[in-house]
Image (cartoon, rainbow, N blue to C red):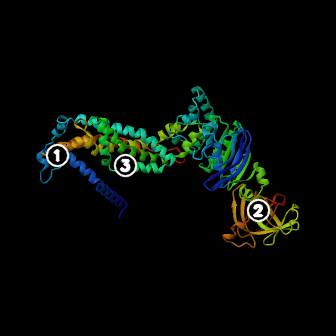
Amino acid sequence: MASVSIRNVRKSYGPVEIIKGVSIDIQDGEFVILVGPSGCGKSTLLRMIAGLEEISGGTVAIDDRVVNDVPPKDRDIAMVFQNYALYPHMTIADNMSFALRLKNTAKSEIAAKVERAAGILGLGPLLGRFPRQLSGGQRQRVAMGRAIVRDPKVFLFDEPLSNLDAKLRVQMRTEIKEMHQRLKTTTVYVTHDQIEAMTMADKIVVMHDGIIEQIGAPLDLYDNPANMFVAGFIGSPAMNFIPGSIGGDGFTTEDGSRLPLGGRVPAASDGRPAVYGVRPEHFRLADEGLAAEVVVVEPTGSETQMVLRPLGVKAGREDRKRELTWVLRERTGARPGEVVRIAPDPALAHLFNPDTGLRL
Amino acid sequence: MSRPLRKLLDKAGMAVCVLLLVSPALLFFLWMLSLSLKFEIDNGAYPPILIPDRFAWKNYTTIFEGNSFLLYFWNSLIVTGAATLFALLVGVPAGYGIARMRAHKSAVVIMIARMTPGLSFLIPLFLLFQWLGLLGTLWPQIIIHLVVTVPIVIWIMIGYFETTPMELEEAAMVDGATRWQIFAKVALPIAKPGIVVAFILSVIFSWNNFVFGIVLASRETRTLPVAVYNMLSFEQVSWGPLAAAALVVTLPVLILTVAAQRQIVAGLTAGAVKGG
């Protein structure tokens, strides 16, 4: 087990800078998830920790030892790849023991370690088979087994669940989390799926365009997003953003509706343009508030999701992003075309600067 | 038109097309077979006879009796075997290196060496072998056959290694393997089908090579294609024994190709990455 310290790390390919100075501190035993849209540099950063990508600037240290120039084989890390990368010509047992055999570990020790890992992951009956004879979920488990057997300082996961179907993904998510709780190995996990990040991580690093937008505990990011990007990225369905301006003790939308601020008006901001952010589950029916037409009703059983178009917003592709999402726990008899009045919970709403995107 | 009839016609049409396409190769073999089993008198018959009344098995026995056919067979085996073995030893790692380092320019240089007419190597090499006193041994032929076999192996292996997933090698790297271990324990076993293809093509090209042999071989060091050519004499062409010899020369390559075909088709990478 080990800590990982990333200091001002940069990566460029020619003139193009992919990662623009990133610093993260990962504590011993922590489960850290790098999350962001594709192309944000999260996988590149993980590969730099693994030693598969050269570091253009800054330092990566594992247990206070700078490893910039240490080849992957000497970093004592294990990595699980998106497509599993199992050696097709080796049995499952050989796949799992490959690293140990390279180190000339004693046969009895290899057998014991493979057996232990197979036990943890329920791979016992599969040890003699070849990867091509396994299902996707089983292959995924073998890839994890290969990492566990090593007993490395750090586990690295590169979008390990994105090739699995939805049901299996949820199951493996739980298994990975359970495995981490059991082994307590420092883990860096890359995903583009914010639900994976929310459910598994001790600490989430939200990346976008090669920079870190925010680092924090899952619920902390959810409740206190630093900017509009994080607010929009974390949480599903995404947060609603309503443009308008601050005035008096409230917020006036562009079409003149008033939204409450609950007394949290930033100083000297009267008349200042702002974006009002409210999560879909933080609306409720109200006598006054936003009047909106129901566009779509999507019941899932446990909750109902509704797409609403505020009155005054025209139907059409351009105004799609001004539509609002409302999630409610109870079932509803609302039908498309009906007009409802909803009000946000002011205590849970956020204000953002429309130019910088930062939270006010 | 009813569907079963239509299906039948589809199949028949397909069969005719296939037959037409492969007929040049097949007919040529059939005629050779026919020639090898006919007596001299039937060879010139008009209209031509495909299946003679009496089979001239003698054609086959004479090639093993009269000439030092077994010696030439042995020579061919040594030259092709050694040239292919060396080519694999050099070409497989070279192909791996070129594929991984994306050294496309050196691949082109090798291609140019392959495209240069073999004869242009022959004269300087002939003088060199003479100077080294190697003429009269099989070494000159083994060495010059490398000009044919090495580029084939390298080019096939480049193509093969470029398609093997990089993640496997990265996984091995993280697992603690050195460059050489990655090559030997991961890349090489996965490339087995590619190596088989390279091996077969190298054997075929080397086995069938004629030009190098005709220049460099002495009476004792002839390979089979040269030996067959020498059966044509000024006085007469004995088609029967010639065709029989040609068939015997082709047979090993034919058998090898048919036997190894399955190996080539069986994709070993199945299951390496997602899917399947």
Q: Position of residue B256 (x, y in %)?
A: 33, 41
Same chain for the residues under marks 3 and 2 in the image: no
Which of these two is toward me, B236 or A55?
A55
Above or below, A92 against A256 in this view is above
Which residue: 42% across, 45% down? B154
Q: Position of residue B71 (x, y in %)?
A: 24, 34
Above or below, B9 against A136 in this view is below
**Residue tagged by mark 1?**
B239
Q: CA distance from mark 1 to mark 3?
A: 34 Å
Whether residue B140 is visible here, answered yes or no, is yes
Which residue: 57% across, 27% down? A107
Looking at the rendered structure, the secondary structure element under dot 1 is helix
Mark toward the viewer: 3 or 2: 3
**Residue tagged by mark 3?**
B114
User: Residues at badges 1 and 2 in contact (C-beta under 8 Å)?
Assistant: no
Whichever of labels 1 and 3 marks the residue nearer the N terminus, that label is 3
Identify the image quadrant of residue A312: bottom right
**Residue tagged by mark 2?**
A356
Which residue: 62% across, 56% down? A15
Kind of residue at disc 2:
Thr
Looking at the rendered structure, the secondary structure element under dot 3 is helix
User: Residues at badges 3 and 2 in contact (C-beta under 8 Å)?
Assistant: no
Q: Position of residue A14 (x, y in %)?
A: 60, 54
Whether residue A129 is visible here, answered yes or no, is no
Which of these two is toward me, B255 or B215?
B215
Chain at tag 3: B
Q: Quadrant of the N terminus of chain B?
A: bottom left
Q: CA distance from mark 1 to mark 2?
A: 91 Å
Kind of residue at disc 1:
Trp
- Tell me, for residue A267, which label it has, or none: none
Chain at tag 2: A
Above or below, B15 against B170 in this view is below
